[in-house]
Amino acid sequence: MNRELKFRGWDEFEKKWAICKIFLDGENGVDKNLQIKSYDDFVVIEQYTGLKDKNGVEIYEGDIVQNFHDRTIEVIEWNYDGHFCLCSEKHPSGYGTSDAWATMVSVIGNNHENPELLE
């Protein structure tokens, strides 16, 4: 299954979303150890998961979502084994995302602008 590759950048210095240039570290953009990097060390690059929440909002790495089934608040993270996962106090090691899961959550913020939602 193919999915659209989209990214966003958070400027840690300016504390705002940034237009950023990224480059793929690999020959012709193809490398099994692909690294996504920014030209600016202070810009955090976050990737689109390919999923939309129940309201049609795109879900990105770093987004904070609320599950309406059990009211759990979780953050989207990139897992070491190459998958997006959800992490929360209830699930500190995370668990996978899916199309079915996405229809039960709503993006309520992100870990840059709304860190208090994770407290």
Image: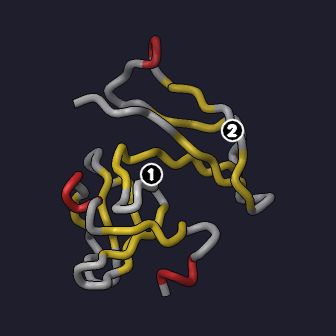
Instruction: Tell me which residue sits at (57%, 46%) in the image.
Output: 45
Task: Give the alpha-carbon distance from disc 2 to disc 1, as whole Å.
Answer: 19 Å
x and y percentages locating residue 9 in the rendered image: 63, 47
Q: Is residue 116 left or right of residue 31?
A: right
Q: Is residue 5 left or right of residue 86?
A: right
x and y percentages locating residue 59 in the rendered image: 42, 55
Instruction: Tell me which residue sits at (57%, 77%) in the image.
Output: 115
Q: Amino acid at mark 1?
A: Glu
Above or below, 16 relative to 119: above
Reading the image, the residue beneath label 2 is 20
Q: Residues within 10 Å of mark 2 (few under 14, many from 20)?
A: some
Outermost residue, right side: 14
65 and 39: which is toward the camera: 65
- Mark 2 or mark 1, whichever is nearer to me: 1
Q: Amino acid at mark 2?
A: Cys
Reading the image, the residue beneath label 1 is 58
